[in-house]
Amino acid sequence: MAQTSVKDKKSAPKVQNRPASRVLARRETISAYLFMLPSLIFFVGFVLVPMGMCLVYSFLDMGIDTSAATFTGLSNYVEMFQDKTFIRSLWNTILIVVVSVPLVTAFSLWVGSAIYPMRSKLRSFFRCVFYLPVVTGSVAVTVVWKWMFNPYNGLLNQIFGTVGFDWLGDTRTAIWCIIMILFTTSIGQPIVLYVAALGNVDRSLEEAAAIDGATRLQIFWKIKWPQIMPTTLYVLVITTINSFQCFALIQLLTRGGPLGSTSTLMYYIFDMAYNYQRFGYANAMGVVLAIFIAIFSAIQFKVAQSDNG
Amino acid sequence: MKRAISRRDFLKVTGAVGAASLLAACGDKAASSTAASTAGSTAGSTAAGGVEISLWTYPIGSWGGTTSKLDDIIAAFNKVHPEIKVTYETLDYQNGDNLVTSAITAKETPDIIMEGPERLVSNWGANNLMVDLSDLWTDTQDDIAAVSESVVSACQLNGAYYEYPLCMTTHCMAINYEVFEKAGALQYIDEATRTWTTDDFVKAMETVRDSGLAAVPGILYCGGQGGDQGTRALVNNLYSGTYTNADHTEYTANSPENVKALELLKSMVDNRSLNANAGFQASDELQQFANGTAAVTFCWNASNKAQYASQVTFTPYAMAFPSDDGVPELCGGIWGFGIFNNGDDARIEAAKTFIQFVCDDESQAAESVRLTGFFPVRDSLGDVYAGTDQAEQMGEFASLMPYLGDYYNVAPNWTAQRQNWFNMLQEIMVNGTPAQEAADAFVAASNV
Amino acid sequence: MPKTKAKKSSLDGQSQGYKIFVIIVLALLAVFFIFPLYWILTGSLKDAITINAQKPQWFPLNPTLDNYVRLFQQPAIQWLLNTIIIAVAAMALTCITAALAGYALAKKRFFGQTVLFSLLVCAMALPKQVIVIPLLQEMSALGLNNNLLAVILPTVGWPFGIFLMKQFSETIPTEMLEAARIDGASEVRTFVSIVFPMVKPGVGALAIFTFVNTWNDYFLQLIMLQKREVLTISTGIARLQGEVSSDFGLIMAGAALAAVPIVAVFLMFQKYFTQGITMGAVKG
């Protein structure tokens, strides 16, 4: 960074006159890129370049013996859309994101509003409690949940009196079990964020509205909601990211089973690459997933921006 | 909106960030020193005086796992060959294959790997990643063939030997002896031969169910990646079906015998003399057997018995799988060593030296086998457990060795068929798909 | 500012009934959220028979440290240390690079800005599974196999931090930057003395998010690290979990070792955590 400053310093001072705007624009571009250089090195090096390689590999029939790869054109892509597990995984991925993002956001906002007016000790207590699964680590939490779901001596069946019911082995319940665990490991941060955001809400506006006879609900929607909107945007983004990154749960609990009912694209790509050792096919699915996520993120961002503005 | 930020808050955050960067600085240092040491170890072959090789083992008795005896083995090796330094990694079955795949992709494979032919030969060997070990076989092939011809054929592919075997066993099942005794189900087993017929098996399981002594008579696990040998052997034996054709080129799970067996199992699931769990892997089933929930396990061998010894409070009694003709054909397990071809002749030679020492050295071979908890593949080693305190407990497994059946694990598409197999069991046992239909689907998906 | 909330109950005037309902619901949920950690801690003190018993023992009646003795026969401390190194290094590098880039994206007008920002937004949620094979080959080409940097570097490359810091930097009043320029401050001085102090809250939020996420990023660690001495606590625990036999006592001890330090840090620095995020209310 030091070099940046030296270069900029030489020319920056007192160039106030507008005519040289093209020079200025160029200078600004250079300095902007210098500021971004450290980030870009990492981003290009460890995200874009691998993504490019991924695209190339997606046209190959490549196995674990990478030297024996052959070009197969679009056949990986064609195969994908005839692959039932792929379709299932795509659907599961969408399901997880579509269910868990609004659920986590709404629930954490509720918990946030519920614990925010409490005495500070109690508030801290609940905040910590909901943060615990986040900091305990997903591998450790998963081990406990696996036992809780055990059909014969797991905790859940003992509570519900349904001994013998195989939560993780039933195609109808397995994905919901995953979503629930994901839920417990996801709401910690949003709650902390919302409690904080509610603390920053301008109280004088609230009081004025209360004097004017606004109901609690009105106060919430008209006054609090707009003010915590930025936090909501942030929560939406991190929850989406968390949902797309959900991997350890699936790998350690169900390995995508039973019958592909908990397989997500992230898991299926891994499974294809590592267990079936079909690198070309896995990368082709990766490309499709990347496009899918890019579109999703772009839409989410646009919507949130327009809401915000 | 930011007016609430006090000076103190600033200081706190600054402090936190400062501390973080400080830690990060140390962190980078630590990371690079790790890098240095790693680099040092992989570049071992050029080190003055000696060669350094690495050995990765799957959990095969005390050769791997969390209480590995590898240090002792390497120490014994170094007494004879001090010039070769051996480092090791113990893999687990859960993630072991992933690690090896990572290592292959990163071109950083270990020199020696210890597992069975389905990985060493059918996967890595078939992908031209392994060294041909024919020279190790020259003196010992007859000795190994005397125990089992199928071991010899399992270790080779297109004329090259990609595995040099150390030990073998038969996978069997086990019953909770006390539960069977109290339930009055012992009458259905032949204790002298540890065998039972299909009819007796059905009756025994129903007797156990009716006794209520165990929460479930038995659990048919339909998930996971391993332990498939147990469910395969169960299905194949009930009506003497086969898993593949004689040449090991096609899967035959949809043969009339196998379909009949699958239908029988489904009827047992329906009448609660068996349970089927799609979410269960072999380890989950074993856990339920070990704590007395289930009265039988379909995934048993000497190694599993040793692993669970500290948890069981009853007598796990090893049994052959039930068979209509009373003559079981058990699946064999073969474990041995392969060498990844890393192009460095010195390390390949050193790896061969190590393998020869642990498998063939007169003072070491028997001990190497004993540490696996299995049986030698070489006839000349005789009974390696005679006179040791393991003798008694190994006796029950030794008596099952004669039932060793065909070793078909070298059939093509092995990894994919394993998943298909479990999917088929789930379809039939849990979702109620007709056995013929699911078995046909399995065969169609697995035969390439 | 938290202190002032003590006596505003009249405003939030929730009915007594609702308050009781909230407390009951939260208390029930609390049990649910505390339980895993409780079970890990107590489970780590149970022997093999008890932990796998048919009837769960709610409290270890015969506590044993045996699991910990066996855990420390593994390089568990090294694993913990590796995890800390990875999380802290990724956190610091991400914060620094993202603060610089976020500022430039928010406050400078330059060629390729829109394209670049769109690219970053689109890549933000990209799971690492997509690029794992090329990444692995790249790391091997860089000689970083089995090196903690192989986990750290891709984590830093992940563009979420830039996005977050860009959002924060938008709140910096442009007049202040103009004023600094008129005063002849260099770019770097402007950044250090004006920009950074203003986006610090964002850096705090990003630091926490990156730290926790990296700590829990099991996947990248699983793929990049194979040798026992470079494992992290998560991958270490996972390795203790075999296919045919799960030594739950040992796993619980490992899980406890993983959880206790970070939970303790969280409890101790709760204020910093929450205040770091407090101000992290992205631009209004």
Image: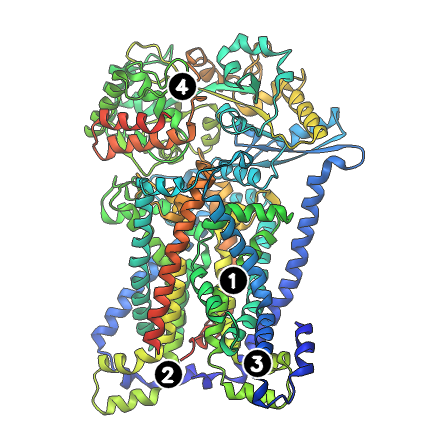
* Alpha carbons under labels 2 and 4: distance apart: 75 Å
| Subunit bearing disc 4 | B
On residue B249, the disc is: 4
Evaluate whether label 3 is on the same chain as label 1.
Answer: no
Q: Amino acid at mark 2?
A: Lys
Q: Are marks 2 and 4 in contact (CB under 8 Å)?
A: no
* Alpha carbons under labels 4 and 1: distance apart: 51 Å
Q: Amino acid at mark 1?
A: Phe
The residue that mark 3 highlights is: A22
- Labels 1 and 2: the sequence-earlier one: 2
Q: Amino acid at mark 4?
A: Thr
Task: Assign a secondary structure to mark 2.
Answer: helix
Q: Amino acid at mark 3?
A: Arg
The residue that mark 1 highlights is: C211
Label 4 vs label 3, nearer the camera: 3
Q: Residues within 10 Å of mark 1 (few under 14, many from 20)?
A: many
Label 2 vs label 3, nearer the camera: 3
Q: Nearer the viewer, residue B61 or C202?
A: C202
* Alpha carbons under labels 3 and 1: distance apart: 42 Å
**In the rendering, at what x and y percent does residue A134 appear?**
43, 59
Work out whether C104 lies above or below A128. below
Pick the quarter of the image with the N terminus of chain B.
bottom left
Question: What coloring was used for the rendering?
Answer: rainbow
**In the rendering, at what x and y percent does residue B249 appear?**
40, 19
The residue that mark 2 highlights is: C5
Residue C57 seen:
no
